[in-house]
């Protein structure tokens, strides 16, 4: 029987006969909750249980090998951040707190900029991050599928058919596997594969959160996860955020897609573009200058750019343009080990 877990009160309960992917009010507090297949939900719990066990074992080994470091009070005038190290990248609810965002908020406040955060936007206990990683890692093959789904949503179509007969067996299998995985994560309302004709039939999920995901939200999740992974590897404290609304002294309002602030460093801001962005270049130039960020720390990551195009635009404007393939290298250069 399908089950759901309420993100508000933590209740786990059966979803009666509701279809997988449907929304149902929590029987305890009434908060809308997503219904999941029981087997799929248990598999994810087991994965996270073993991940937590491995992390705990590593921490115990580290504690037994080295004496705990001496604690010292912060010096006046120094910013402090909590050492969020060895983060479980697939369950970062521990980071989805106002305290984790505090260093970024202090950085903006020091420049008379109001920053508004939604901690839930970096909670990866759901499946948006998993789906985004699948899509982003294989975007060279999956890009056309994403554009077709986006187009279907914008034209108010309820379905998409994919003919795979003209593709190589390897590519056809990869696309079919992705569609099946996304369906298991409830990103499609229905999935059917006609093996003889090699046609995948998808019924789109009407839920607004899923529509937003396919309309470009997946790229923000993908970039955020790459940045989080690199910041975690750097070994130092950091603060990270998505969808930050900033209000300048003259009340101008802007939204920043993905942010990361290493302790004692400069924020890295990445704007994620899965569609047209050229008309907004001047806006981003002015925004970078108002934030006081160097060119290398204000990035436009666009899916329709290759390395040569990105290098040309970077040379023309005081911004850093990157393709998806080039982003990991840039993150490695900016978010270096402490």
Image (cartoon, rainbow, N blue to C red):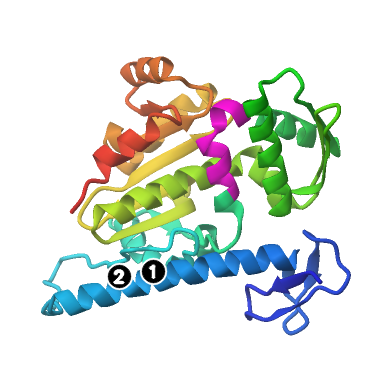
Q: Which residues are magenta?
A: 131-144
Res. 253 in view? no
* Residue 27: x %, y % from top left: 78, 82
The residue closer to the viewer here, 64 or 226, is: 64
Residue 58: which disc? 2
Q: Give the crowd class for mark 1: few <14, some 14-19, many >=20 residues within 10 Å.
A: few
Contact flag, marks 2 and 1 (Cβ < 8 Å): yes
User: On the picture, is 292 further left or further right than 21?
Assistant: left
* Residue 180: x %, y % from top left: 72, 45
Res. 22 in view? yes
The residue closer to the viewer here, 210 or 200, is: 200
User: On the picture, is 33 further left or further right than 310?
Assistant: right
Residue 210 magenta-drawn?
no
Q: Residue furthest right?
A: 17
* Residue 128: x %, y % from top left: 60, 52
The residue closer to the viewer here, 260 or 323, is: 323
Q: Main secondary structure of the magenta part?
A: helix
Element under disc 1: helix
Separation of marks 2 and 1 at Cα, in angstroms:
6 Å
Quarter holding the N terminus?
Answer: bottom right
Q: Residue at x 75, y 64 (%)?
A: 37
Residue 54: which disc? 1
The image quadrant of residue 31 is: bottom right
The residue closer to the viewer here, 315 or 198, is: 198
Element under disc 2: helix
């Amino acid at each position: 029987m399908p089950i759901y877990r309420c993100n508000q009160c933590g209740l786990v309960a059966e979803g009666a006969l509701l279809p997988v992917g449907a929304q149902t009010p929590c029987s305890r507090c009434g908060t809308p909750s997503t219904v999941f297949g029981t087997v799929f939900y248990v598999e994810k719990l087991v994965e996270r249980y073993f991940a937590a066990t491995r992390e705990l074992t590593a921490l115990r080994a580290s504690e037994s090998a080295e004496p705990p470091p001496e604690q010292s009070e912060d010096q006046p005038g120094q910013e402090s951040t909590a050492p969020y190290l060895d983060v479980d990248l697939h369950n970062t609810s521990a980071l989805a707190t106002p305290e984790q965002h505090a260093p970024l908020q202090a950085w903006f406040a020091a420049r008379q900029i109001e920053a508004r955060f939604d901690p839930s936007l970096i909670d990866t206990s759901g499946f948006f991050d998993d789906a985004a990683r699948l899509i982003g890692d294989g975007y060279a093959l999956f890009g056309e599928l994403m554009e077709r789904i986006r187009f279907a949503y914008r034209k108010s179509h309820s379905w998409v058919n994919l003919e795979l007969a003209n593709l190589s067996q390897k590519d056809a299998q990869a696309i079919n596997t992705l569609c099946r995985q996304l369906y298991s994560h409830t990103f499609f309302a229905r999935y059917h594969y006609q093996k003889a004709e090699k046609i995948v039939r998808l019924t789109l999920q009407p839920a607004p959160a899923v529509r937003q995901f396919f309309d470009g939200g997946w790229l923000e999740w993908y970039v955020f996860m790459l940045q989080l992974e690199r910041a975690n590897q750097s070994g130092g404290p950091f603060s990270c955020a998505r969808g930050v609304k900033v209000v300048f002294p003259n009340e101008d309002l802007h939204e920043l897609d993905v942010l990361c602030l290493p302790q004692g460093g400069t924020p890295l801001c990445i704007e994620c573009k899965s569609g047209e962005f050229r008309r907004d270049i001047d806006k981003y130039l002015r925004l970078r200058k108002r934030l006081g960020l160097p060119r290398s720390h204000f990035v436009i990551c666009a899916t329709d750019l290759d390395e040569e195009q990105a290098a040309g635009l970077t040379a023309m404007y005081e911004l850093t343009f990157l393709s998806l393939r080039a982003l990991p290298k840039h993150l490695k250069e900016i978010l270096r080990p402490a």
